[in-house]
Image (cartoon, rainbow, N blue to C red):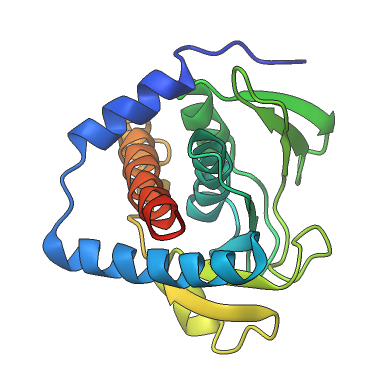
Amino acid sequence: MLTTSITSTENFFKNAVKSIVLKEDRKVLLHKISEGIAKEYLKNEVVNLNFICTHNSRRSQLGQVWGFYVANYFNLNINSFSGGTEVTAFYRNTVKTLQKAGFDFQVLDFSHQNPKYEIRFKGSKKSILGFSKRFDHPENKEPFIAITTCNNADKNCPFIPSALVRYHLPFEDPKASDGTPEQEKAYLKTNRQIAAEMYFIFNEVKRLTR
């Protein structure tokens, strides 16, 4: 079943970009990542990004979905994937916060442990597949640039053989809010942060590759 969007993805995205204030040290990190992606893009006219977090359930999934959207927004030939150091599930609260950002989820393979979703947004000609998997799963095209999104992944992935280069871009984990009154707010906060920072990265890549 295809879910109903609560807001348009474009509106959520633009509001996130306007509302998030980035510190200078964060901008330096984001610019470094942008330069690395642009360098690879200029060589091959395509880049594969693999967002990696320990469980591939929250932040790495948000990174993949927003990478997919923002590549389309800037008309860049950049593919986004995600993976973990272990397999769990595309956590339900992560799905919900992305639905609130206007993304549509269609269940392709239902499993209480690890369902697979086809993910789209209004106007998209393509879709991506969302489910929890290891970073080296065949679904993740190689070679790729690895972007680790949590401290555990940074510590537990000292060597990623398939990575052209690896960057560590940590985000606040909304997991601690699960089952509390702050749950929705916490997930939306991380959702907006990742959307805004993907804008910064891809906007820079666009500028650097003109």
Question: Which residue is depicted at the point 84% across and 64% down?
Answer: 138
Asked if one can make out residue 54 in the rendered structure from this viewpoint, the answer is no
Write down the quadrant of residue 181 in the picture: top left
Q: Nearer the viewer, residue 61 or 75?
A: 75
Residue at left offset 43%, top offset 51%: 206
From this viewpoint, is residue 109 visible?
Answer: yes
- Asked if residue 45 is positioned above or below residue 74 in the image, the reply reads below
The answer to whether residue 39 is left or right of residue 176 is right
**Which residue is depicted at the point 14% across and 58% down?**
23
Q: In this image, 208 relative to 76: left or right?
A: left
Q: In which quarter of the image is the N terminus?
A: top right
147 sits left or right of 176 in the view: right
- Nearer to the camera, 205 or 160: 205
Q: Is 160 placed above or below 49 here?
A: below
* Rendered view: 191 above or below 155: above
Residue 78 in the image, given as x and y percentages of width and height: 61, 52
Q: Residue 64 location in percent, x, y?
A: 57, 49
Q: Quadrant of residue 111?
A: top right
Closer-to-camera residue (70/12): 70
Residue at horizontal 64%, vertical 45%? 90
Residue 161 on image: x %, y %? 69, 86
Query: Which residue lies most toward the front here?
Result: 210
